[in-house]
Each structure stands twice: as structure tokens, then as C-alpha cells.
Image (spheres, coloured by chain):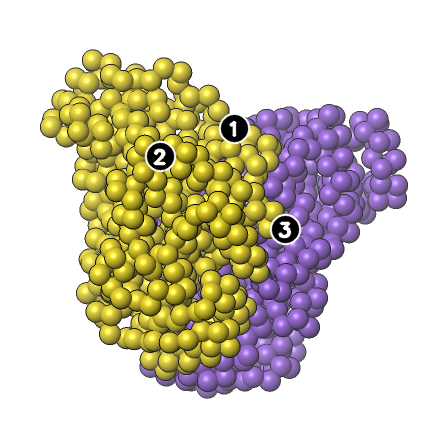
Chain colours: A purple, B yellow
Amino acid sequence: MAHAQSVQTHLDSTLMQALTRLLGPRLSTHPDTLQQHGHGESHHPPQPPAAVAFVQTEAELIQVAQWCHQFRTPMVAFGAGTSVEGQLQCVSGGLCIDFSQMNRILEVNNGDLNCVVEPGVTREQLNLHLRDQGLFFPVDPGANATLGGMVATNASGTTTVRYGGMKHNVLNLNGVLANGDTLVTGSAARKSSAGYNLTELLVGSEGTLALISRIQLKLYGIPEQVLAARVCFPSVQHAVTAVITLMQYGLAVARLELLDQGSLRAVNQYCGTDYPQQPTLFMEFHGSTALVAEQAATAQALCETNGGVSFVATTADDEKKRMWHARHNAYYAALAQVPNGRGWVTDVCVPISRLADCIDATQADLQQEGLSIPIVGHVGDGNFHLLFSIAPDDEPGLQQAQRINQRLIDRAHGMGGTCTGEHGIGLGKKTYLQQEKGATSVAVMAAIKQALDPLQLLNPGKIF
Amino acid sequence: MAHAQSVQTHLDSTLMQALTRLLGPRLSTHPDTLQQHGHGESHHPPQPPAAVAFVQTEAELIQVAQWCHQFRTPMVAFGAGTSVEGQLQCVSGGLCIDFSQMNRILEVNNGDLNCVVEPGVTREQLNLHLRDQGLFFPVDPGANATLGGMVATNASGTTTVRYGGMKHNVLNLNGVLANGDTLVTGSAARKSSAGYNLTELLVGSEGTLALISRIQLKLYGIPEQVLAARVCFPSVQHAVTAVITLMQYGLAVARLELLDQGSLRAVNQYCGTDYPQQPTLFMEFHGSTALVAEQAATAQALCETNGGVSFVATTADDEKKRMWHARHNAYYAALAQVPNGRGWVTDVCVPISRLADCIDATQADLQQEGLSIPIVGHVGDGNFHLLFSIAPDDEPGLQQAQRINQRLIDRAHGMGGTCTGEHGIGLGKKTYLQQEKGATSVAVMAAIKQALDPLQLLNPGKIF
């Protein structure tokens, strides 16, 4: 997939004037702003835009897209800046469209368990708004990402084992095409077979097909009881074997997370917690008080059969908050192990029956390389991450991470898995996409891109 | 969307020779076979193909597609022939590809709760095969459709309220493009963010983008207990109000079906049952014995608050089988009310909070037209069907059904709903798709079709 050959480091002056007229101070070319909008949260070198537009309404967004289309200017959508595969790098320069000010919650439909939000709403903002109504939105990638960004990468996370990821929880989208035309992908009905599934086509398209302007999401009633539990194991292998047992048993666990010794060490340092520095599963159960107690007891028994010890269960809010805060900060805790460390987080996902083999072989690989890298994972889904933190000038370290990642992805592919469970392709996994799907699938994706964005203006250079 | 202008009533003789050499007696031009392959189960006039190819392997399928591409011959996939929106009509003639002999179950992966099947496997065949392993595949459209056909229309049905429809239960597909190139859409992992979601693009594409050649499906453990229940109401309005209460309560019902007075009368005649001829909900609960008992008690209480009477619950296999056999035969029972009746089944789906209003207004419309038409529905999803049966020569009756359907769809659209919850667009809903999604969405779909099948060979004339 070709993208604009030259990098637009300056916008056309007529375009700049039009944008300034429309947005006033919400159009920025301040160097700090440009720099901040040229990267996400990982090792990919920043590539700043020529300008940043802080849009506030769908009408503004359409106008901006029309003008950019007219002036053949690349457009890169920006939410909270928490992506990790180089999705935000402006490889062709152009305009960054920042959605953080387009963040109204437009509807909460209690009776239908759904809501309509603008793309700049963050998941924490939404859940705070919903709490008094007894509702919540479950998808939880850890970072306080925007919902638009979460749509764009088909984000998932700790609760996906129970509630699914973004693709399972988006009912309907409005999208603005590269030329400013708007489309509606779905409806407010719970299901539909009306034509091609454009909703799911836009979910995970990383801003390359349309700019998301409105999102209708499924909601859930806050469960009567939420019980969190943790249990330690003598080895990662024991913990993963327990996970496989739990999943094959069919236990309706709402969260099922692995933290290995290294990640707990990092987390304890970073968060001031004192969890035992042993391979540990963090779990959560949602439901009626009786059901949750039954599930926790079953989980404890199954874990103990697999060598689990020191099972601790709690329904106390502060303790649950402390646990999930620790888990959510594992990436930042790992980064903090190296001063000014650059993050490289792997993201394979394999069928659950192969998870122990995959982690075994990966640990052996790390040992052979003389490395101790924290491992965390949404293990109930077969998805786990190595959290590399690489010093700014450590090019050999970066190359080593790249080689280990390559071997890890080969291993996952050999097991029927995927190179990315939840982070997307961006710049970082373009070659692996070919390897995973084959040339025909990637050609089909590229043909769809060409059909919808023939001038290659939307987030050029990504995925392909 | 243009399709081949002329109808290919005969295949090119060189193509015929090649196909005959490949398939022998599995290539048919027998008039009965052609006639049988020119229609589904509804009022749309048959349009037969020029020949029918009974493929048995993916390799044969690829070869057939390559030759058809070379000779510019339309290809229409045929499973069990149970679609209802004219998906099977060969509007441009050409070759019908019958998948009924490509029906091997290739893998059952117990530990990962998934299986791999060829597209001609029917859902009953799969579930019979799985039963001894304690597993089942939940999607249940009533008819014993092929899984390939169910993928093609994004079928759903009685269990969708709990387990989702096809789009929620397909992990991965192999597809053969119009030129014979094959693609893999997903992986065996439970989740992935690797590029555009081609799996969900093919699910519901009605054979217009690719021929499905291999399907990996999610499976579920057979629940410890399956409890079926039925409860009668003084009116359809009372029953629907109870449904809304159950859904808003968050009860994890596995099936939640409405049969009105007319459909129960038809079913009792057709199936020899003696269910009370009153508006009735058929329900099912899946889970542990204790959980299911608790859920059934809650359902009974909530239904009785809304006027429900004569609540009957059963875990007896023969009684459950009788109930669901009756429900599954409601369409055929309604058809049988008129000798040689042609079926016209409507398919709107609305947000659950609007369901009572939508059914109220529809019943008033029917009354105004002087008609009594059976109503059944997957009401937990907001999806319901009017089951028209129209005498062969009754053109005014057909036009009346069309007018009522048009008004019903307008009504559903006004409520944020969809013209088709599960049957697809085919020939029957092309104009409504425009009305529902708008010109830009349909243009995007058409651009995708053009990108993947530029010669318009795959199921031409459908959806657009």
C-alpha cells in the first residue's frame, strides 16, 4: 500500500487560513503540541503532524475532512495517545485531528442498555457518568483511553473473557469518510442482517477507513456482587495450567489475569503494594451474591488442585481498587524499571490449549537471551504481554526485543494464534500481518482501503 | 450495482465439458434439479441456474471458481435452500454451487471449545456429532440450515438472546474469491486485532463477496441443566411488557420466544399439540440446577406481575423437544393454513424498549386491513415475524403483504430498528437497505463489492 511519498511538514496556507477561521485557537502548530501528537506510548520514534485540530463537533469534523480532502492533506485521528503500535505517528505529516474536546455523552438509554457517545469520551468518564444509573461499560484496556481510540484498535482487556472486546460491544457507528461524506453503519437494534457489516469493518481499522464521529455502545447492569480474588502459584506454568482448567471447566469468570514474579516486583515498587512476588492470578467474579460465592469456591478448588496457594478473596471496594490499579499499572511499572525506558510490549494471543506451551517456550527463549522480562496477560483469552523497557540509547536492546518478538510471533502463528490480541497493527506489525493472513487477505484489505480512501489520506502508512 | 445484463441460461460448452470432467454426475442440468435450486422458502418467484455443481472439496470449489471466472459465469452458493429473501434466485442464470456434499466435520477442539467444519454441514448434523462430547453449537434459526448458509445470512434465532448470532460465533473462515483465490479471515485465537475484520465482513455477505469453504466455530459446554417454561398472557401487549421487564431485569434467559394466538392455533393443528391458544412466551434457562431453578422462579414472578398465568416449567427432554419442535414449525404451520401457500415472513428488529409499541401498531394495521396473521418472535432481541401465507394466484394478497411490510419497516426504522434482524437483504429488502443505511453506506458496500468481485460474478443482483 503506497502512501503519500512526501511528508507534509506544512499545511497549504489556504487550508491553514480556513482551519484557523473555523477553529480559532483550537488549531495549533505549537512545537510542543506537534511533538506530543506524534507518538503513542511505545518505542516507535515520534513523527509529528504539521498541525493539530481540536475538533468539538461532528459538523466541524466533516468540514475539516472536506478541506483536507480538497488539499490532499493526510488526516490522523488522536484520542488519548495510549496506543502502542505506532498508530499515531504522522508518517506523511499532515493534520492530526484531536478528539479530546469532542467528548459529550449524548444518550444513555437505560431501558435498552445502550448509550451514544462522542469519540473523545474516555472509558473512565463514561463509567463515572453511568454509575448512578446502575450501569457500566465493561471493556477495560487498562489505560484511560478514549472510546474512539478503543473502537479504532478493537481494544479489549481484563474483562474481555466475560464481556468481549470492542467489536462485541459496539452497536452502531457514525463515520466520516476521507472526502467528508458521513455514513451510519448499524442501528440501535440488538441484531441486524442488513447488508455488509460496516460496524465491524470500522472497529479495528485504526483510522484508515473513516474518522469515527459517534459511537453507540452496549451497556450492562452493575452486578449485585463483584468479588475479586488472587492466588499464588509455584511457577507460571502452574498458574497457566490452572487457567486452562478454569476455562475448560466453563467457569464464568469476569477477569482472569496473570502477573508473573517480575511484574509483581515492578508493580510493588511502582504502586507501593506488597503482593507476594510469585506468579499470581488476579480474578474477578460478577453476579448475585450466592452465584459469586459459588464461583469463587470453585475457582479456589480448581486452582489449589493445580498448586495454587494463599487464595485471598475480597468484596471490599478499596482492596479491589488497589488490585486492579496495580494490574493496570503493570506496563508503566515495567517501564519505570529503566530510567526513561522506552516500552516494547508484545501482544500474541493463542488458543487456550496452547497457552502453557507458548509461555514455556517464550520463557526459555528469554532465559537463553539472559533476560528477565515481566509477563502479564489476559490469560483467560490466551493473550499475554512481555513488557520490555529499553534505555533511550540502547539500540542493541531494541534489536534484541525485536528478535524475541519475531520468534514469539512465529511461535504463536505455529499454534494457530495471532500476532496481536488487542493492540492492532499500526506500524509495528505490518510484516507480521502478511505472515499471519497471507497475501490474498492483505490484498483484500488493501483493496477495501483503496475503495474507501483512494487518495490514501486517512492515517497513511498504517496496517499495510 | 449493475449485474450481468443477460441471463446465462446455458453455460459455455467448453466450461460444461471441463466441469463434467471434474465432477462427473455431480454436475447436473436435470430440469428438476435446476428448478429446485432456483428458490428458497418464500414467495419470490424461482429463477433457476443453468447448471448445478455438487462440490465435495475446497480444491474442487477453487477449480470451479477459476473456470467460472474465466468464462464470466455467475456463481450462486446453495446450502439447504432455507433462505427467505430470494438469496438463491439465479437472476443472471449461471452456475449454482451446491454445498450439501461438502459436509465433513474436520476438527473438534474440545480444549479450546471450537470446531472446524465444511460449509455443507447442517446445524443438526453438527450438534448430533458433538453431543457425546458434552458440547453444542447454539445458533438455531429453526430450519436445519447448513452452517455455510447461516454464515452467509448472519443467521440467528431462538438462542441469540443468550449466545449471540453467527457473527458472534464464527472464529475464522476460509473464503474463495470470484477468481478462485483463497483467503483466511481470522485465526484460532479467541480474539485478534490483526487488520480489517474480514471474518465479520463475510458473515452476512450472502455469497456476494466470497464462497465460504471452511468455518471455525465457537462451541459451548452442554449446560448441567436445561429448563424450559411457558406462560400465557391475556394479550400480546401483556406478554411483550413481561419480556421488556425480564430483559431490563438482566435475567440470563437462553431463549425467549413469543407465539401469539394465531400462531399457536396453526402450530396445534400442524404439530398435533394442544397448547392453550393464548399469547404465550416460550422460555429456556441454561446453567447449574440451582441457578436455573432460581432464574425460572424469578421469571415466573416477573411474568405474573405482568398478567402471566399458567406458568409451566419442565426439564423433561420429550416435553422440551415437543415445545421447540412446535416453535420451529411455526412458519411451516402458518404456511399450511393456505393450500400451497407462499410464505412472506417479515423480519424487523427494534430496540427492546420500543417492542410493545411496534407490535401494537402492527396489530392495529393488520386489524385495519381485516387480516389475522400469526406473529412469532425472538422477542428477547426485539425481533419478530409476521407469517403471511398467500395463495398461489392471490396477487392482491401479495401486494397487501408488501404494503403491510413496507409500513412495518417504516415503523421499525422510526424506532431506530432494522428491516432485517436475521434473514438478510437478498432480493426482498434491497430498497429498504437504502432507506435504513442511507446512500453513503450503501455506496461503501457497493465499493467493497466492486473491489472484491469486479466482474459481479458472485450471487449477482443481491443486496444492492
Amino acid carrying label 3: it is Ile
- Is label 2 on the same chain as label 3? no
Amino acid carrying label 2: it is Asp
Q: CA distance from mark 1 to mark 2?
A: 39 Å
Residue B331 visible from this viewpoint: yes
Q: CA distance from mark 3 to mark 1?
A: 23 Å
* Residue at horizontal 26 percent and vertical 50 percent from the top: B144
Q: Secondary structure at mark 2?
A: loop
Image location (x, y in percent) of residue B275: 30, 67
Q: Residues within 10 Å of mark 1 (few under 14, many from 20)?
A: some
* Residue at horizontal 42 percent and vertical 83 percent from the top: A294
- Is A430 positioned to the left or the right of B149 in the image? right
Q: CA distance from mark 2 to mark 3?
A: 45 Å
Q: Chain for mark 3?
A: A
- Is A261 positioned to the left or the right of B232 in the image? right
Q: Residue furthest left?
A: B25
Q: Residues within 10 Å of mark 3 (few under 14, many from 20)?
A: many
The answer to whether A215 is drawn above or below residue A260 in the figure is: above
Q: Are marks 2 and 3 in contact (CB under 8 Å)?
A: no
Q: Which residue is mark 2?
A: B394
Q: Point out the frontmost of discs 1 and 2.
A: 2
Image location (x, y in percent) of residue B109: 27, 58
The label shown at residue A215 is 3
Quadrant holding the N terminus of chain A: top right
Q: Chain for mark 1?
A: B
Residue B160 visible from this viewpoint: no
Image location (x, y in percent) of residue A78: 69, 47
Q: Which residue is mark 1?
A: B447
Image location (x, y in percent) of residue A396: 56, 50
Q: Chain for mark 2?
A: B
* Residue at horizontal 57 percent and vertical 70 percent from the top: A221
